[in-house]
Structures are given as structure tokens and as C-alpha cells.
Amino acid sequence: MAVCGIRASRVIHLVLLANVLRLPITFFDVTPQGRVLNIIAQDMADIDYVVPFTMRSMLNVVLQALASLGFIVANLHLLIAVVPLLALVYFFAQRFYVATSRQLKRLESVSRSPIYSHFGETVTGVTTVRAYRQQERFIETSETKVDNNLVCHYPSIISNRWLAIRLEFVGNCILFFASLFAVIARDDLSPGIVGLSITYALNVTQTLNWMVRMTTELETNIVAVERVKEYSETPTEAAWDIPEKKPNPSWPEKGVVEMEDYGTRYREGLDLVVKGIDCYINSGEKVGIVGRTGAGKSSLTLALFRIIEPAQGRIVIDGVDIAQIGLHDLRSKLTIIPQEPVLFSGSLRMNLDPFDEHSDDSVWRALEHAHLKNFVKGLPTGLEHECTEGGENLSVGQRQLVCLARALLRKTKILILDEATAAVDLETDDLIQHTIRTEFSDATVLTIAHRLNTIMDYTRVMVLDQGRIKEMDSPQSLLQNSDSIFYGMAADAGLV
């Protein structure tokens, strides 16, 4: 039982973790983080500790109860007439209690998630909470959520007491009838057998009590398995690897991007955020993507990585429909420098080359091109400098340059900049733009522009509005037309 419990728990946890890590990003947009943590932490703890123990205890008490009743009935035959009636009372009490207890457990589990969510949010934003002197409000909110959880927990204790009264009644009835029939059949039984039967009848109350409790406890805690199973079977992203549809190792060789009547939405039932996109981007072209807030610029970059799947049309890169190949084959061949730089806890070298594919010389060369070499050389441990969670011990500009160095190491044929310089100063912006122009001169570059002056020397500019391409031409041509949307944006930025 112990070995099987450990094995089952391990398998369930591995399946859950593998599935959660492969869930689409849109799932985390609509699911509170506390709920996911609750499943992985509390529900898995129940499966690890409570369920195996409860199952073992249940088997013990069931066998004890059967043995006790069997011995009493074998010696006091008249008890056979009463046992079915008492079993019926016992069965109805148990069924009613189990159904109630199971639902109360579900309510308790659901009401526990907001506690985790609120606590996590408070810890993350504790500096802001203190700055606005809102400690009392957040403490009060936390206590309210705990109270709501206890409102669901308290009835389960009350239902326990309700069950105890009825079980005591059934057990005392068995003892009463066993004593009564022992007196009636005293001439046919030896005093030793009568005494032993009464002793078993005295113990059967406690055994029946434990049997129901363990059965109920098992059914109640199986809710944890039910919730984990639900998350283990939630639909994940597309296949990570499709051997029969694998592109050539050298793909993409040119970096030609073609969009044919492309449209996408964030989730089923929502409106299209990008619709009817038709464009052809040649090899080595530098294309700036501009538009007002909500025009669909970032959605287009998410579509290239298939973080959101197509709702209509398709995207073709060097003759390969990206929707037909595995996600690993696609994402490993594209490089993005995001708006918010992403770093993990670990060494600087691990953040630059997570799969250990490049030599130290290549890493230093990338750092030099990213204008970070002198900074890293000045660190006591150099490339082994330990980054804290999210790279908090580096400035935002340094983190952005680390992301640039990571992109330089990968050196793919298609580079996507998602407002990569929005959070850095003008000097760092100039450094990044200069490096991109020199190091990615032969690559296809798609840039979501935050500052229009960074894309004025690009090949073409794509102007998006409400998810559609409104204009697409060279910056010079668009600026010559004073009625164009791009001219209006440039005028707002003071460039014309």
C-alpha cells in the first residue's frame, strides 16, 4: 500500500506538472495564479499524505467491522433479523453525509484559492502597499478571505457531529439486540461465548464509526484527485515536435514571411484581434509595425510564435506553413527581444546560453556586441555572476542588453523586437539599434516601434488599425502623403 501510494502520487504529479507547463498562455490569462498554486500545493499534499493513509485505514476498519459482525451473527443467529434494518439506517446516514461532506470539501478548496492569490499579490506589490499606507486594508481583505474559507470549513465539522450521533445510535442498537438475544438464547450458549459476543458488540460501535469516517474521508479527499485530473486533462498547446512535418535543419534560410488572409483571437468566443492580414515580407527586409494602442501589433508577434493560434488564413515562412510544424521547431528558429526583459534565477551565462550550445568565446563576443563586456568583466565572478529572480540585481537597461546578447548568440534569420527599447533610456536605445543594424543586417527584422525615429531608415512600415493593415510602404513614401495615418503619428511625435 505504501509503495503503491508513493508511485501513484509521483505519476499524478508528473502528469499534472507536464500538462500545466504546456498549457497555452491564454489559460493563465483567465485562471488566477492562486488556483493553480492551490492545485499543485494543497491538493497534491492531500494525494501525497492523506489519501494513501485514509485508504489503508479504511481497509483496516472495514475488515474489522465485517469480522466483528460476522462473529456476533455466527453466535447469536437471531441478530440476522435485525442487521439488515440497522444496515439500512446506517447506509442512508452514510450516503447523506458523504454527499454533503464532498460538496463542502469542494467549496472549501475553491474558497482557499483566493487566499493564495491575494497573499501572492500582496507580497509582490508590498512596496506599493507600504508607499500608499494601505497595510490595514490588505490585512483586512486577507482576513475576510480566510473567514470566507472558514465559513465553508465549519459546516464540515458540524456535519461530522451529525454523523457521530446517528452512528452511535446504530452501534448502541447492535449492542442492545446482541444483549437481548444473548439473554433469550442463554440456555444454548456458554457464558464465554456470550461474554465474547457482547465484548465485540461493545467494540462494533467504534469500528462502525471509524469505517464511515474513513470511507467518507477517502471520498472527500478524492476531490483532490478529481481537481488534479481536471488540470491534467486540460487541452495543452499544439504538439511540441511533429517528426513527419519536421522542416530542414537550416530552415529558415532566407527569412521570407508571408501572411495570407491571417486572423487570430485570444480565446474561443472573443472577437478577432487581427483580421485579414495580407502581406509579403522579403528576405532581409526591415519592417516597422506601428499603430495606436489596441491596433494588434503585439498580437501579430504572438501569432508568429503561435502563442495564439490562427482563426483564419495562415503564416508561411520560407514556404513552410508554421501551423503544420511542431512548436519547438518554430520557436527555436525565431528570436524575440521582448518589451519586458526576461531573466531567470541562475548564472549570467545560463541566462545567455540556457542550453549550453555555445563556447565562452562566442558568449564574450555577443556581450561585446551588446556593449556589456566591460560590465561583466568588472563583476567579481564574471559570467558566473548569480542573477536573482527576474534579474532584480541588474538594471532594466542591463537586462535588456542581456536579452540582446542572447539574441546575438542565437543569430536566427528572423528577429522580432516587441517595443524592445520602451523601458530604456535614449543612450541604451541607440546602442541596441546600432547593434541590430550591424549584426542583423542580413536578417529579416520585424519591429514594433515605440519611438518612430528608430524605424525611419527601415525598408517598410506597416500601419495597423483595429487589427487590419491600413498602410504599408516605405517611411519616406508615407511621409510624403500628409493624409496618411503614419504622417499623423510622425507629426504627433514631432518628427515632421
Image (tube, rainbow, N blue to C red):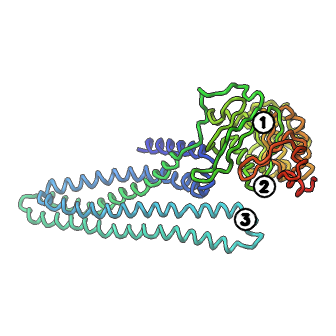
Residue 117 vertical placement versus 406 (above, below): below
| Residue linked to disc 3 | 126
| Residue linked to disc 1 | 281
The amino acid type of the residue labelled 2 equals Arg
Q: Nearer the viewer, residue 175 or 12?
A: 12
Dot 3 lies on which element? helix
Q: Residue at x 59, y 46 (%)?
A: 23
Residue 421 drawn at (x, y percent): 84, 49
Which marked residue is nearer to the observer: mark 3 or mark 2? Answer: 2
Which marked residue is nearer to the observer: mark 3 or mark 1? Answer: 1
| Residue linked to disc 2 | 292
Q: Earlier in the sequence, mark 3 or mark 1?
A: 3
Residue 214 vertical placement versus 337 (above, below): below
The amino acid type of the residue labelled 1 equals Ile
Kindly check if marks 3 and 1 are in contact, taking CB atoms under 8 A apart as contact. Answer: no
Residue 301, located in which quarter of the rendered image? top right
Is 86 on the left-hand or right-hand side of 342? Answer: left
Residue 385 drawn at (x, y percent): 81, 44
Instruction: Characterize the local packing of mark 3: few (<14), some (14-19) or many (20 or more) Cα atoms within 10 angstroms.
Output: some
Residue 187 vertical placement versus 252 (above, below): below
